[in-house]
Amino acid sequence: MKNVTYNISIAASPKMVWDTMIGVETYKEWTNAAWPGSDFKGEWKQGENLHFSGPDGSGTLATVTTFDPYNKILLTHTAMLQPGSVEDRTSEWAKKWVGSLESYSLAENNGATKLTVDMSIPADWEEMFNNDWPIALDRLKQICEK
């Protein structure tokens, strides 16, 4: 796994960033900037499973391992989702992804919020995430700063 980190400073409170980041409608708005059709199903609560998918149902299944409101979310990816939301843990593709971590940390600093996204990912996915995360985070910033 390769560790990658993405940061952005947003002129809004941690509560505003948090609520925008995980809100049902606003989640779609900021993630669709980088990953068209992105959506999630499930509850943002510790121990819950979240299905992150595109229009055809393909995506990833993750368990919320840490949920500390306005501070931190840690997700552990437990399966890939094939079209139709079919869970896959055994294909070579899924084996690369299962066990990867995705963390969101928020820190208030002089009236702004620093959002840090840390991920452990398969090395061959780094280029995609390096391209897409800045786009998504910039859109999140725009929404929060309206």
Image (cartoon, rainbow, N blue to C red):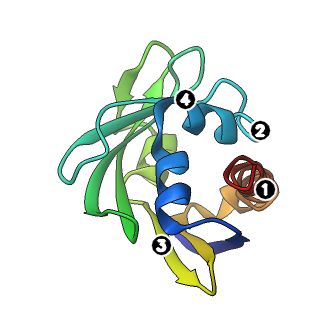
| Residue annotated with mark 1 | 138
Relative to residue 126, is residue 102 drawn left or right? left
Q: Position of residue 87 (x, y in %)?
A: 34, 27
| Residue annotated with mark 3 | 105
Local secondary structure at mark 2: loop
Instruction: In the rendered structure, find residue 25 and report the number of the disc placed on it.
Output: 4
Q: Position of residue 1 (x, y in %)?
A: 52, 69
Relative to residue 46, is residue 87 drawn left or right? right
Label 1: few (<14), some or many (≥20) within 10 Å?
A: some
Between 91 and 114, the one lying in front of the other is 114
Q: Residue at x 26, y 40 (%)?
A: 49
Label 2 vs label 1: CA separation? 9 Å
- Amino acid at dot 1: Asp
Q: Position of residue 96 (x, y in %)?
A: 48, 53
Q: Position of residue 25 (x, y in %)?
A: 55, 29
Give residue 27's quadrant in the image. top right
* Residue 59, above or below 75: above
Q: Residue at x 53, y 56 (%)?
A: 16
Instruction: In the rendered structure, find residue 33 and report the number of the disc placed on it.
Output: 2
Q: Cβ–Cβ below 8 Å for labels 2 and 1?
A: yes
- Amino acid at dot 2: Ala
Q: Earlier in the sequence, mark 2 or mark 3?
A: 2
- Amino acid at dot 3: Ser
Label 2: few (<14), some or many (≥20) within 10 Å?
A: some
Q: Cβ–Cβ below 8 Å for labels 4 and 3?
A: no
Between 114 and 145, the one lying in front of the other is 145
